[in-house]
Image (spheres, helix red, strand yellow):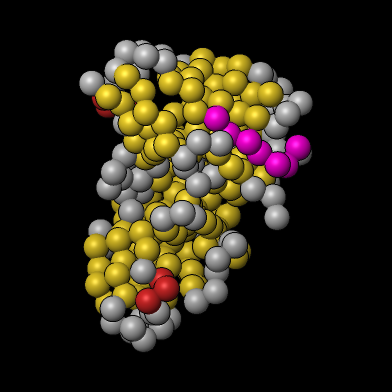
């Protein structure tokens, strides 16, 4: 079946460096993508979204890039901080449901 | 999480017993969802609702039922709990099917 996946299960970065978390999706008809952050013991928290008519969207310290040609999504976090340590999920909106990837663990080293 | 609460937060139950988890929202959102989260599987959709009394199955619906008699409440029932249903359950809400979801804090269910 169609699914949303991630290239790297764990990413370790030094505090202050930029982080890039990648995601591949398989459904070329998907038109809406979301990144979520989940801290230990909490529910997923919305970070940023992007629609398929865009290839880039920026938020506060975060940028999402969408490459529809290769069906690839990435989340860039600038100046990574210890509070950014969490699991990050990409999700693809197919109709009225979100399909999530397995997640990438981001560890920030001080 | 603002506007959405799950209860209970933790529950331990015995195999074969019925269990009901509750999701309550104060946002008046039309769409509500139940997910389960397990290591190595991410978040998987159990059931969802697109309005009062309107529900449908997700990818892992076997062994679960839901009810939505009011806009604000979405109940998930395990008619006869099994050990394979030990998991963390998340409820989510959305005002539109083309917007992101807001998740609750989760219910950790252990079936012994």
Query: What is the quadrant of the N terminus of chain A in the image?
Result: bottom right
Residue at x 66% of width, y 38% of height = A25
Q: Position of residue A93 (x, y in %)?
A: 62, 41
Horizontal placement of B99 versus B6: left or right? Answer: right
- Classify B96 as above or below B40: above
Is A46 left, or right, of A100 in this rendering?
A: left
Residue B92 position, x and y percent, is: 44, 49
Q: Residue at x 25, y 59 (%)?
A: B9
* Residue most extreme to the bottom: B16
Which residues make up the magenta segment?
A: A22-28
Question: Which of the pair B65/A109 is nearer the observer?
Answer: A109
**Where, by quadrant of the figure, is residue A68 drawn?**
top right
| Residue A37 visible, this orientation | no
Q: Nearer the viewer, residue A105 or B85?
A: A105
Residue at x 55%, y 66% (from the top left corner): B60
In the picture, the quarter occupied by the C terminus of chain A is top left
Image x and y of residue A73, in percent: 60, 28
Residue A6: where, in percent of width, then height?
55, 38
* Up-down relation of residue B15 to residue B98 (above or below): below
Residue B56 inside the magenta-drawn segment: no
Residue at 36% x, 69% y is B86
Tell me, yes or no, whether the highlighted magenta stretch contains residue A23: yes
Question: Does any portion of residue A28 appear in the rendered image?
Answer: yes
From what the image shows, is residue A54 above or below residue B12?
A: above
Residue A55: quarter of image: top right
What is the count of numbered marks?
0
B50 on left or right of B71: right
Q: Give the side of residue A52 with respect to residue B54, left or right.
A: right
């Amino acid at each position: 079946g169609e699914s949303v996946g991630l290239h790297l299960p764990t990413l370790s970065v030094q505090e202050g460096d930029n982080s890039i978390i990648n995601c591949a999706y398989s459904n070329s008809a998907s038109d809406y993508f979301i990144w979520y952050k989940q801290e230990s013991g909490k529910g997923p928290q919305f970070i940023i979204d992007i629609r398929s008519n865009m290839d880039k969207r920026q938020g506060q310290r975060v940028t999402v890039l969408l490459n529809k040609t290769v069906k690839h999504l990435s989340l860039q976090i600038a100046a990574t901080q210890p509070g950014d340590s969490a699991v990050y999920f990409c999700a693809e909106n197919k109709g009225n449901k979100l399909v999530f990837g397995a997640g990438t663990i981001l560890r920030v080293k001080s | 999480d603002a506007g959405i609460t799950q209860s209970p937060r933790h529950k331990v139950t015995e195999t074969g017993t019925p269990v009901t988890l509750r999701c309550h929202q104060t946002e008046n959102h039309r769409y509500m969802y139940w997910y389960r989260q397990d290591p190595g599987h991410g978040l998987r959709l159990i059931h969802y609702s697109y309005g009062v009394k309107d529900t449908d199955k997700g990818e892992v619906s076997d062994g679960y039922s839901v009810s939505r008699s009011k806009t604000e409440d979405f109940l998930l029932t395990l008619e006869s709990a099994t050990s394979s249903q030990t998991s963390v359950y998340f409820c989510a809400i959305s005002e539109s099917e083309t917007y992101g979801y807001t998740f609750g804090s989760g219910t950790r269910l252990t079936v012994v």
